Amino acid sequence: AFAMKSQMWLLDPRPNLESIVDMVERGFELSEASNTPVMLELRIRACHVYGSFKAKNNVTPAFTLREAMENPVRDYSRVVLPPSNFVHEVEKVEKRLPAAIEYIRSHKLNEFLGGHKGDVGIVVQGGIYNTLIRALETAGLSDSFGETDIPIYCLNVTYPLIDEEVRGFCLDKRAVLMVEEGQPDYLEQAFNSILKNADIPTKVVGKAVLPHAGEYTGQALLQGLRAFLREYAPHLLKDDKQIDAISVPAEIQKGVANVVPQRPPGFCTGCPERPVFSAMKLLQKEIGKFHVSCDIGCHLFSILPPFDIGNTTMGYGLGWAGSSAFGAKADKRTVAIMGDGGFWHNGLTSGVGNAVFNKNDNILVIVDNGYSAATGGQDILSSRADNKTKSTNNPISRAVRGVGVEWVREVNTYNIGRMKATLKEAMTTAFAGPKVIVAQSECMLNRQRRERQ
């Protein structure tokens, strides 16, 4: 939907390392060829693949950053401001889109796999290709390496579509199965439109046999595949007994699920954020429950067992902004949670600044572990690191005081008693105005990395 609305091209490569790496390179080339941003989509299951690929040398740009800075180019026609933006809308359709289509077609970014004959075929988003092959293998129609007699049109580029390829693939087929995860069924609608305009009677079958929403698992695709073949190519169907012979029986699946240890998401062992929510849990036992607005980051694990703390979450750095509506006087103040990464991302302005401006009387707990921990431990403004290329050691407490917060406390997270007492003070104080608690302790994963160096 974002790609279609904004006229940005969307890549959805097959989940193997060579395809993904190649599509990244092709994506840059496609962007240059069409003067348009390109998005590359990876589904979560792409994280489970492994393999190898050949690395290439970096490509030297046509000019350096220094040259660009010293020789600025001004082109008003590139500025997004009326009336130029109306010209851009026309350019997207009349110039950029045709250029993108030509590049995708000539460089064969989409793939025609499987067999080359037959009156049925399968169209699949690239990211779901592996799951489709697993379903075909279970149905006895493919091997583990994707060798199948059924023609497959693999869309490594899901927008824009190449009408010529769509017509060519569907022309000699009675029906095609559209494997399109999610909704609405943009691809199914687009294929139907392309075929109708070309007077090609091929039936496009998608959501009629596959789930309208949710993840397309191997089992879901197997059921949809069999329903499709039952209607349009029954001669390809294997006997149910043959399918059962290579499928894992339900009772065994259930047994395996009971034996394999569960790995629910949660805080790392020794995580300095655990004591924050332990203290909050103890305070709730003492004064009762209160509304907690969560944020994006490791600290969001508080919303799961065993803490079960958190009523809402809106977005990265939006913990306090997400509870800004709770401005009425009440017996209990609300508590918002925010990480140091989210704080510097936008929480200082959208949360703290607005709370000061609106004279908010609620509480913000900023989890200050010294890094942007959830994304890999990158340094941020308040990191304690001696970073030679970045400005660090800028305290969060100084920043919030700088925008007008008067009630500020800094607490070591591992001191649960003091953490609880500070939370209680913030909850019960007669002071009217925003209250900020900076809960400090270093992320243990990053501390281990630091001390091992």
Image (tube, helix red, strand yellow):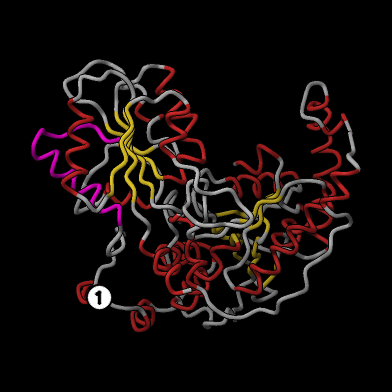
Query: Which segment did they paint magenta?
Result: 272-294
Relative to 345, does residue 111 appear above or below in the rendering?
below
Report the residue at 47% width, 80% height from top.
Answer: 140
Can the viewer see residue 160? yes
> Amino acid type of disc 1?
Val
Q: Nearer the viewer, residue 314 or 290?
A: 290
Q: Which of 57 and 257 is in front in this view?
A: 57
Instruction: Name the quadrant of the N terminus.
Output: top right
Residue sitting at the far left: 286
The vertical placement of 355 against 124, above or below, is above
The residue sitting at 58% across, 78% down in the picture is 146
- Quarter location, residue 158: bottom right
Please state if 125 lies on the left or on the right of 312 as rendered. Answer: right
* 198 relative to 318 in the view: left or right: right
291 drawn magenta: yes
> Can you identify the residue that label 1 sits on?
260
Q: Is residue 235 visible?
A: no
Depth check, front residue: 295 or 257? 295
The verdict on residue 69 being magenta is: no
* Percent of width and height locating residue 280: 19, 42
Q: Where is residue 91 in the image (x, y as percent from the top left)?
A: 84, 36
